[in-house]
Image (tube, coloured by chain):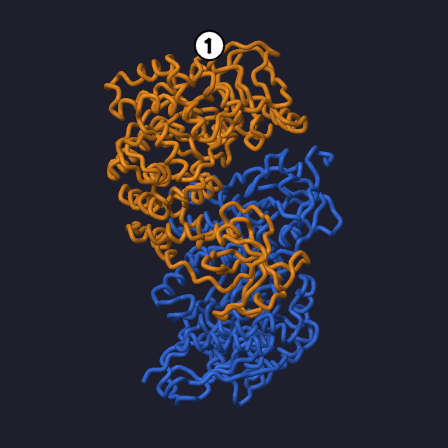
Chain colours: A blue, B orange
Amino acid sequence: MSGADGLPTLRVRRLGIDTLQQAVAFIHRDSPVCRAEGLSAHTSILVSAAGCDVVATLYPVSGDFLATDEIGLSDWAWQALSLCEPAQVRVGHAPPAESLSHVRAKIFGHRLAAHACDAILSDIANGRYSNIQLSEFVTACAANPLDRNEIRNLTQSMVQVGERIRWDHEPIMDKHSVGGLAGNRTTPIVVGIVAACGLTIPKTSSRSITSPAGTADTMETLAPVDLTLAQLHKVIDRENGCVAWGGAMRLSPTDDILIRIERVLDLDGEGQMVASILSKKIAAGATHLVLDLPVGPTAKIRSVEAARRLSAALSDVAQSFGLHTRILQSDGTQPVGRGIGPALEAFDVLAVLQGNADAPPDLKERAETIAGALLELGGVAREGHGAALAAATLASGSAWAKFQRICDAQGGMRTPPVARQTRDITAPRTGVIDRIDNRRLSRLAKLAGAPEDKAAGLKILARIGEQVVEGQPLLTVHAETSGEIDYALDYARNNPDIIGISA
Amino acid sequence: MSGADGLPTLRVRRLGIDTLQQAVAFIHRDSPVCRAEGLSAHTSILVSAAGCDVVATLYPVSGDFLATDEIGLSDWAWQALSLCEPAQVRVGHAPPAESLSHVRAKIFGHRLAAHACDAILSDIANGRYSNIQLSEFVTACAANPLDRNEIRNLTQSMVQVGERIRWDHEPIMDKHSVGGLAGNRTTPIVVGIVAACGLTIPKTSSRSITSPAGTADTMETLAPVDLTLAQLHKVIDRENGCVAWGGAMRLSPTDDILIRIERVLDLDGEGQMVASILSKKIAAGATHLVLDLPVGPTAKIRSVEAARRLSAALSDVAQSFGLHTRILQSDGTQPVGRGIGPALEAFDVLAVLQGNADAPPDLKERAETIAGALLELGGVAREGHGAALAAATLASGSAWAKFQRICDAQGGMRTPPVARQTRDITAPRTGVIDRIDNRRLSRLAKLAGAPEDKAAGLKILARIGEQVVEGQPLLTVHAETSGEIDYALDYARNNPDIIGISA
């Protein structure tokens, strides 16, 4: 019942509970440990195994699914402790996170100094903040907005608590599109073009958190993306470009934790968005960065004014880290390309890379614009000539050839899967399409099974400004089961204005 | 698999998980419901049974403790749905709480209007805010402190979402001591005195949340406290006084929810404290109120200046609700009485009521002061003569007689239990006691088993200013098991300065 250090021990059990990045522990109410340590619901407890520890929120259990000498752990806590069953852990009261005093000071209007940011982010990275405390931090930074100096401090601390990739040469190119726009899958095309022109672009991307597909999800239908840091270096040595999943590399690991809370609160303060974007790029070793900000009423950035403010903050903070940055504004009023969902987006990407006649022109044009900016910023095209070089690299087939070699280097090129079932959603009346709701379109694609089912999602058959007649197909739903088709169609029936048609 | 309204159904299972006031649902990841509805970790789901619904945070489960057609519920969710096994519930996405837009407006510096407060508190009372969102609200109100008007609105909304007791006459007396001071158990004595003098004092009290004893816990060792509203009315009709547990009566039910979050954040904004205190009193039907504010470095109110500000806000807001209020400041530098823990505090209360020679003089004096203020405020003593009338009522035995009749009316007087084991903690050196840490003393009493073990806790044998010699007992630990004694003694050994001794 007691470890060498006097703390009580419990047999650990993996309950397989997905709490996202939150450590939760379940102990029987009648456990001598609960009693003796004075542990009750929502106590923060320190759970320790050989060499690792994690702070978890305690939920006492009176039911019969746990024995009194057991402790059940959420998946996140289990991973943090690097456990294998059977194992024993020690349990005690968690020391309060000292850095919370800095969060309270921020609430009361003080500025976050560098050492305060370091302390807060280090405690967050080590799992010492509960959801309640994470929410406190995010809210405090929204109520008393971060000034430039605080954004710099926050960015620096976010980089510091994770891994940082070092490259032996410059320039290291990178790109980022601010989210919220379905189908905006330019990255594989841009990487193909930029790498074909000789620049180094080691792109790390994320998987979907709430969207129907992340870039890593789409790329995974074309090649393996789950590379180690060593494998990433090998791919870059060979092909000077890649599209890998960044999740396992611990680049700015607190970013995902904070984003999860910001999303629940529907708060993305400018300062936190800047730190979030730049910390990942700095950690990945980028020296030259192109940022794409799509602006539209249902995109993440809703007005030109908001884009202007965000650009100013991004440029300023990027500069202080020696990052050469160019910022592009783009049209965010409707989805880009035709597919929404991992495989359907991959088919769009392939059509552009292969120069097919039916390739979505908007996706092609965006990819050329972003690649062009990178080519100019990286010094291989003169100012004003980047987009033309990008277009030529696409047209010549050399971007496609490069992309195939990158896929080979990542482990072998794959053919994206095709869904078992499809069903059309038709125009309820005749008229002109005058708006498309990105958010509800994403929800519809998810109801069809994306991104878990790689083949699932939507194909968009109409765009803003087009004349449609009643009964004409607007969308095709792709799904693996008829149940999912039904759910998606139900949702579409209850939301007939996802695609707005004016008389 | 599908209810009459088309929503999928699941077999419900009570998991016996204590999450405090938080609704949590567990569904197997492979459940068709998770898949079809696009439910993932931390999704807010609406769980509906006959006539009731609750918004719960979803944790998907991949382990084997739940079947794919089951839903596991935390105790709070179970109670909110008034369920009995076996039952089926319907599950779907929860509509977002509309009132969160008011919380965001508060973050951005807007004032909380009455309708905004109503909407927020109504959603909180109906379980529509997750911990993350509750923390957002509490933090927003700390970062942009509530003005008087907002405090009034918040108080009004907190009263409105719960039950409100109506009395057919005036005055209805009430008292409240702001917490943080161990052993400060004046209430049963004050009620005995005030009721003996003919005033009506229907006192509702809380159980401990984090302290070693709440007034309801202490009173429960003397008489049943778990009264229904009808029983409360009967006791008052018969004896014009009572000390009942308010928890089951739904008086200002959001107060407990907000306090839980404030405690985790260690934030108790003045505005929220005022609304918390006054909403409970207004809901209980009080017309005349005496507030006791103990001030000390380890009490809840740490400075005279903080007490002054809090008094001003309390008086002002109370007045706007027509509540006649008198505020007393008292010494909060050390515990009151000798016992800490339900039964040990009850013995102090009995000693004072019975006029025993060894009754703790500080507890007696405080009770007389507070009762005196109530007697003056209620019009049965002239200004300046209340405390003397209170002392006389105690000395004559009529307060004790009244208290016994109240206990009988509540269901019968009981004798508090005595712990099986005791052990002394002695002075580590000779000197003068110069400070006592209320917070760590409370922790020590809890390690000994209070308040779950009614007999457990501490007896304090020394006070500030007393000369002690090395080896002289300072505290006696009372516990039911030797394990708990050991835990408490370990903690005391590691914290030798809980009672400070200067040379």
Q: Which residue is mark 1?
A: B357
Residue furthest out toward the right: A86
Q: Residue B374 at x, y = what percent?
A: 31, 25
Instruction: Check the image and report above or below for A454 versus B104.
Output: below
Is A420 left, or right, of B44 in this rendering? right
Is B139 left, or right, of A157 in this rendering? left
Q: Would residue A386 be visible to someone looking at this image?
A: no
Q: Would residue A419 be visible to someone looking at this image?
A: yes
Q: Nearer the viewer, residue A17 or A441?
A: A17
Quadrant including the C terminus of chain A: bottom left
Is B367 left, or right, of A7 in this rendering? left
Q: Residue A163 at x, y = what percent?
A: 61, 54
Q: Chain of mark 1?
A: B
Neighbour tally class for label 1: few under 14, some 14-19, many 20 plus, Cα within 10 Å: few
Query: Considering the numbered disc 1 on the image, is that residue within a helix, a strand or a loop?
Result: loop
Q: Quadrant of residue B382?
A: top left
